[in-house]
Every structure is written in C-alpha cells, then in structure tokens.
Image (cartoon, rainbow, N blue to C red):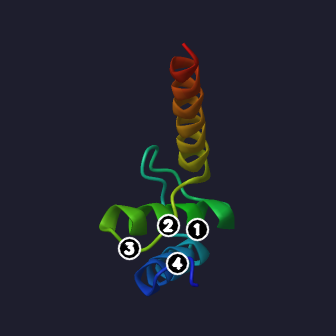
Amino acid sequence: MARYGKAAAKKVEKTVHEWKEGKLESGRSGKKVKSREQAIAIGLSEARAKGAKVPKKAAAKKSAKKKTARKAAAKKRTKKK
C-alpha cells in the first residue's frame, strides 16, 4: 500500500525543484532553505494542509499512542475498584 498520494508527491517534487534553484524560502523566517530534508518537510507540510494523502507526523503518532495507553490504564484502575 502506498504511503503518499500522487498530489503529495507532486508537491514535494515542486518544492525540491524550487530548493535546487535556490528560490525556496522558509515560511516563518523567510530565509532560504539550505537542506534537502527541510525542502521535503516543507513539501509534505503544504501537501498535508491541502488535504493530500500524507501520513501523520511522527510526533503526532507518538502522542496519540500515549493518550490511548493512558486511557486504557485509567479504565483498568476504575474497574478494579
């Protein structure tokens, strides 16, 4: 099963192309993007904002797992009483 949709791939391709030309700028500071990884991250972020098929960020997945684990532990505690 594919992880990323075609729209996301196109957006990343476009941002990496901009980065190679030296035209890609960061959204917050407006400075030029220097690393390839940052260019890819920007492309994925923009694709995610447009609703393209992109997996959730790793940090979001981690916090979601922690939440469900906490809820399960809380349920166990209330059942024992």
Instruction: Give the Cα distance between marks 2 and 3.
Output: 9 Å
Q: Which mark is residue 56?
A: none
- Which kind of residue does numbered mark 1 sit on? Ile
Q: Residue, x 59% and y 43% (percent of image)?
A: 65
Q: Nearer the viewer, mark 2 or mark 1?
A: 2
Instruction: Give the Cα distance between marks 2 and 1.
Output: 6 Å
Q: Residue, x 50% and y 61% (percent of image)?
A: 42
Tell me if residue 7 comes above or below residue 38 in the rendering. Answer: below
Q: Residue, x 57% and y 29% (percent of image)?
A: 70
The answer to whether the residues at label 4 and label 1 have Cβ atoms under 8 Å apart is no
The answer to whether the residues at label 3 and label 4 have Cβ atoms under 8 Å apart is yes
Please give the residue where the numbered disc 1 appears in the rendered image.
40
- Which kind of residue does numbered mark 4 sit on? Tyr
Which of the pair 55/27 is nearer the observer?
Answer: 55
Relative side of 48 to 19, left or right: left
Give percent across and percent down for residue 40.
58, 68
Q: Residue, x 60% and y 27% (percent of image)?
A: 73
The answer to whether the residues at label 2 and label 1 have Cβ atoms under 8 Å apart is yes
Instruction: Give the Cα distance between marks 3 and 4.
Output: 8 Å
Please give the residue where the numbered disc 4 appears in the rendered image.
4
Tell me if residue 45 comes above or below residue 10 in the rendering. Answer: above
Q: Which mark is residue 52?
A: 3
Relative side of 6 to 50, left or right: right
Give percent across and percent down for residue 55.
52, 65
Image-quadrant location for residue 17 = bottom right
> For the residue carrying disc 1, how many other residues have a C-alpha within 10 Å: few (<14), some (14-19), or many (20+)?
some
Please give the residue where the numbered disc 2 appears in the rendered image.
44
If you read the primary sequence from the N terminus, does the residue marked by circle 3 or circle 4 appear first? 4
If you read the primary sequence from the N terminus, does the residue marked by circle 2 or circle 4 appear first? 4
If you read the primary sequence from the N terminus, does the residue marked by circle 2 or circle 3 appear first? 2
Relative side of 25 to 49, left or right: right
Quadrant where the N terminus sits is bottom right
